[in-house]
Image: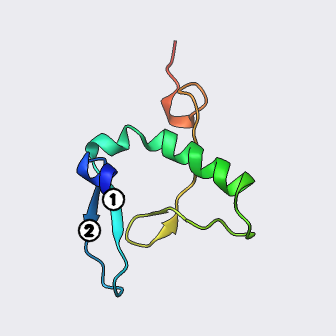
Amino acid sequence: MRKPTRLEIFRQVPTHVGRRKEYRLTKMGFDLYPSFIALMQFGDRWLSVSKRPPLVLVIGLRLREAARLVACSDCQPNSRQSG
């Protein structure tokens, strides 16, 4: 994670759990988010030896699992243009 952090794709944030490190996407990193999700889905399907994915994305303060969805603008429910 050194190089992506050095390139400012991720930033490291302090945690309260021992020596565990947490990384968050920077503004630049969010542009790569669809690529990261696609790689995660590939790994979960083809490379994961356990039944549960090794990494779960969470959203918000309630730590709800985030849906991993990559879709074109025509397929996303809230992005359809009228006309």
Q: Which residue, given by chain and number where applicable, does mark 1 sit on?
A: 24
Q: Taking 52 as reference, is 73 left or right?
A: left
Spot the residue most to the front: 3
Spot the residue most to the top: 83
Please report contact status of discs 1 and 2: CB closer than 8 Å, yes or no.
yes
- Crowding near the residue tagged with mark 1, few <14, some 14–19, many ≥20 C-alpha atoms within 10 Å: few
Q: Quadrant of residue 59?
A: bottom left
Q: Quadrant of residue 67?
A: bottom right
Task: Give the residue displayed 70% in from the left and 62% down from the top.
Answer: 48
Dot 1: what SS?
strand
Measured from the top left, where is residue 38 in percent x and y? 58, 43
- Crowding near the residue tagged with mark 2, few <14, some 14–19, many ≥20 C-alpha atoms within 10 Å: few
- Above/below status of 51 relative to 70: below
Q: Which residue, given by chain and number where applicable, does mark 2 sit on?
A: 13
Give the residue type at disc 1: Arg
Label total for image: 2
Q: Taking 82 as reference, is 10 left or right?
A: left
Give the residue type at disc 2: Val
The residues tagged by marks 1 and 2 sit, at their Cα atoms, a distance apart of 7 Å
- Above/below status of 45 relative to 59: above
The residue nearer to you, when weighing 30 against 19, is: 19
Dot 2: what SS?
strand
Measured from the top left, where is residue 16 in percent x and y? 30, 84
Quadrant in which the N terminus is drawn: bottom left
- Above/below status of 33 relative to 22: above
Task: Give the residue displayed 58% in from the left and 34% down from the top.
Answer: 71
Task: Give the residue displayed 24% in from the left and 51% down from the top.
Answer: 6
